[in-house]
Image (cartoon, rainbow, N blue to C red):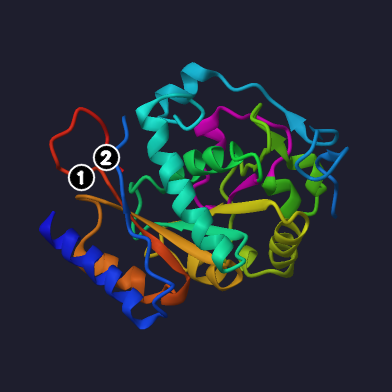
């Protein structure tokens, strides 16, 4: 644990190279275990959102709870953790006019996908924001499974040129939130992520609505070059580190691949601090 804390401290030192108005927002928290208009604007992009082409699915709350998807719960101490993280993230993104956010981790098992989902739900609950969650972990996509989403077409089909963007968007019954799920692993994922198709997709998702925050769940940094390929196209980065899952060296190696001016902060997950609940 001490080594991880030392590595996190080094991440914080990255901020010293920035202007005083751009501190690293290191965030440690505790929680329990083809352009298609995807919604119609009757007043404005945040007015009366009506999903026309986007498939709307109703999520199973028991399935969400089992998978530790908690940000939709109201008046709950656990939810407030992600709300606090949301506020810090949005403040920093608005300060820099950023709209796209990558969630990364050094190695598997750090909790980056759960963080991505819960943060996206929390952002969608802000009345002046919409959120889009994109599963770009093409080697091991998990967002659809965590949410319990099963669709005929997904990002796999879009990347293969077999579906339009509007056909793969899913609203999980939460207003102002749209998910782009990936149902199956993609072969030659790094090459796919470096393609013009993906570059155009990122640009479209980013530019369509000023209120939209796009969150990309990326593969672990040190398992492949997938994340390194896509990071230059995304505005900012949030790193998730899990106690006991990543070494100090792995954390330092990951930080080496992240532009210091784009690092929002580091989340420590599963601390060994005595708690009744999970720790983020």
Image point 13% across, 36% down: which residue?
Answer: 274
Closer to us: 201 or 70: 70
Image point 70% across, 36% down: which residue?
Answer: 170
Q: Residue 270 location, x and y as percent? A: 24, 42
Image point 61% across, 70% down: which residue?
Answer: 233
Q: Residue 95 location, x and y as percent? A: 55, 66
Closer to us: 128 or 30: 128
Magenta segment includes 159: no
Task: Tell me whether the residue at label 2 lies in contact with that at label 1, contact meaning CB atoms closer than 8 angstroms.
Answer: yes
Q: Is mark 2 on a helix, strand or loop?
A: loop
| Quadrant, the C terminus | top left
| Residue for badge 2 | 279
Res 251 visible: yes
In the depicted structure, whether residue 67 falls above or below residue 159: above
Image point 42% across, 32% down: which residue?
Answer: 79
Magenta-highlighted residues = 129-154
Q: How crowded is mark 2: few (under 14 residues within 10 Å), some or many (20 or more)?
A: many
Give the side of residue 259 with respect to residue 121, left or right: left
Residue occupying the far front of the picture: 21
In the depicted structure, whether residue 268 falls above or below residue 13: above
Magenta segment includes 153: yes
Give the side of residue 142 with respect to residue 15, left or right: right
Q: Is mark 1 on a helix, strand or loop?
A: loop
| Residue for badge 1 | 271
Q: Which mark is residue 117?
A: none
Q: Which of the marked residues, 2 or 1, is nearer the chain's N terminus?
A: 1
Give the side of residue 113 with respect to residue 233, left or right: left
**Tally of numbered tags:** 2
């Amino acid at each position: 644990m001490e080594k991880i804390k030392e590595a996190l401290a080094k991440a914080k030192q990255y901020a010293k190279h920035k202007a005083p108005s751009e501190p690293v927002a290191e965030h440690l928290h505790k929680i329990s275990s083809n352009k298609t208009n995807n919604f119609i604007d009757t007043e404005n992009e945040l007015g009366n959102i009506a999903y026309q082409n986007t498939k709307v699915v109703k999520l199973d709350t028991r399935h969400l709870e089992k998978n530790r998807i908690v940000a939709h719960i109201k008046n709950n101490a656990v939810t407030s953790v992600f709300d606090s993280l949301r506020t810090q993230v949005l403040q920093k993104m608005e300060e820099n006019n950023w709209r796209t956010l990558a969630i990364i981790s050094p190695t598997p098992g750090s909790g980056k996908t759960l963080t991505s989902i819960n943060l996206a739900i929390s952002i969608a609950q802000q009345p002046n924001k919409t959120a889009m969650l994109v599963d770009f972990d093409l080697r091991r996509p998990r967002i659809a499974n965590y949410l319990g989403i099963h669709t005929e077409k997904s990002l796999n089909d879009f990347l293969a040129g077999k579906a339009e963007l509007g056909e793969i968007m899913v609203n999980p019954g939460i207003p102002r939130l749209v998910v782009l799920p990936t149902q199956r692993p993609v072969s030659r994922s790094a090459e796919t992520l470096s393609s013009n198709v993906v570059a155009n997709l990122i640009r479209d998702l980013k530019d369509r609505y000023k209120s939209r925050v796009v969150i990309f769940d990326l593969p672990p940094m040190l398992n492949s070059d997938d994340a390194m390929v896509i990071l230059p196209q995304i505005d900012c980065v949030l790193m998730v580190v899990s106690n006991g899952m990543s070494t100090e060296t792995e954390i330092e190696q990951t930080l080496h691949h992240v532009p210091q001016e784009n690092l929002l902060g580091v989340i420590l997950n599963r601390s060994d601090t005595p708690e009744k609940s999970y720790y983020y």
